[in-house]
Image (spheres, rainbow, N blue to C red):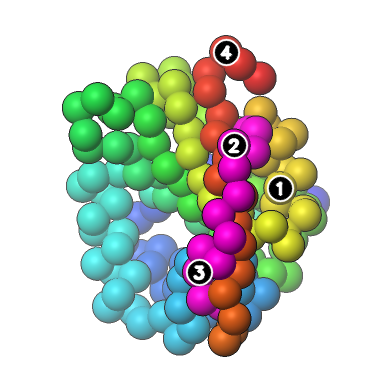
């Protein structure tokens, strides 16, 4: 496999990111909705560039993954950030999520003074759970019926990584 490049997203990446999330295998495992619009993702990226971090993974010049890092705004929680990640369905299992996650952890802990990373993951997504655990995230609890997904409520695990406690 050609090298994966991790970089900050740019405005011109919006359609590639939108196409990733448009795939049912992707949006079913996120809190995104089907049929994402260009305008909605353009606005989302603009907000991320102002208030958070938006990383993409590139493979052979094509964007194949996206990770958003949302630092907490509450002064008492500025040490924390939440993250969301998605990888192109045709590239699952190829190490792209791991590379994105490792880059986000390094950036958060060593440059943004974030010592607590948080996320939610659907309980029926064992590949993602294993990836997060491999990178030091631990399950802190389960939220039953957390989100409506394809007509039924689905549960999530709340996971976190605390710097120095892996």
Label 4 sits on residue: 164
Measured in 3D between alpha carbons, the distance from the residue under mark 1 to the one under mark 3, in whole angstroms, is 17 Å
Q: Main secondary structure of the magenta part?
A: strand
Mark 4 or 3: in front is 3
Q: Is residue 65 visible?
A: no
Mark 4 or 2: in front is 2
For mark 4, give the secondary structure.
loop
Magenta region: which residues? 137-149
Q: Nearer the viewer, residue 139 or 9?
A: 139
Instruction: Tell me if residue 138 is in the magenta stretch.
Output: yes
Measured in 3D between alpha carbons, the distance from the residue under mark 4 to the one under mark 2, in whole angstroms, is 16 Å
Residue 142 placement (x, y as % from top left): 60, 49
Q: Nearer the viewer, residue 24 or 122?
A: 122
Say which residue appears at 29% left-offset and 51% top-offset.
Answer: 48
Label 2 sits on residue: 140
Q: Which of the 4 image quarters holds residue 46?
A: bottom left
The local crowd at label 4, few if under 14, some if 14 to 19, many if 20 or more residues have their Cα within 10 Å, is: few
The local crowd at label 1, few if under 14, some if 14 to 19, many if 20 or more residues have their Cα within 10 Å, is: some
Label 1 sits on residue: 129
For mark 1, give the secondary structure.
helix
Residue 49 placement (x, y as % from top left): 27, 49
Residue 42 placement (x, y as % from top left): 29, 69
Above or below — where is 151 with respect to 15?
Answer: below
Mark 1 and mark 4 lie on one chain; the one further toward the N terminus is 1
Measured in 3D between alpha carbons, the distance from the residue under mark 2 to the one under mark 3, in whole angstroms, is 18 Å
The reply to whether the C-beta atoms of the residues labelled 1 and 3 are less than 8 Å apart is: no
Say which residue appears at 29% left-offset and 37% top-offset.
Answer: 72
């Amino acid at each position: 496999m050609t090298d994966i490049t991790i970089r900050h997203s740019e405005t011109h990446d919006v359609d590639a990111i939108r196409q990733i999330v448009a795939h049912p295998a992707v949006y079913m495992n996120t809190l995104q909705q089907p049929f994402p619009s260009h305008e909605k993702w353009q606005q989302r990226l603009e907000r991320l560039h102002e208030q958070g971090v938006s990383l993409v993974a590139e493979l052979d010049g094509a964007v194949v993954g996206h990770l958003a890092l949302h630092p907490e705004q509450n002064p008492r929680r500025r040490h924390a950030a939440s993250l969301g990640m998605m990888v192109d369905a045709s590239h699952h299992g190829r190490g792209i999520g791991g590379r994105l996650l490792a880059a986000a952890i390094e950036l958060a802990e060593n440059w943004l003074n974030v010592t607590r990373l948080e996320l939610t993951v659907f309980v029926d997504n064992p590949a993602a759970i294993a990836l997060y655990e491999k990178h030091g995230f631990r399950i802190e609890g389960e939220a039953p019926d957390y989100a409506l997904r394809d007509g039924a409520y689905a549960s999530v695990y709340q996971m976190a990584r605390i710097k120095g406690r892996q």
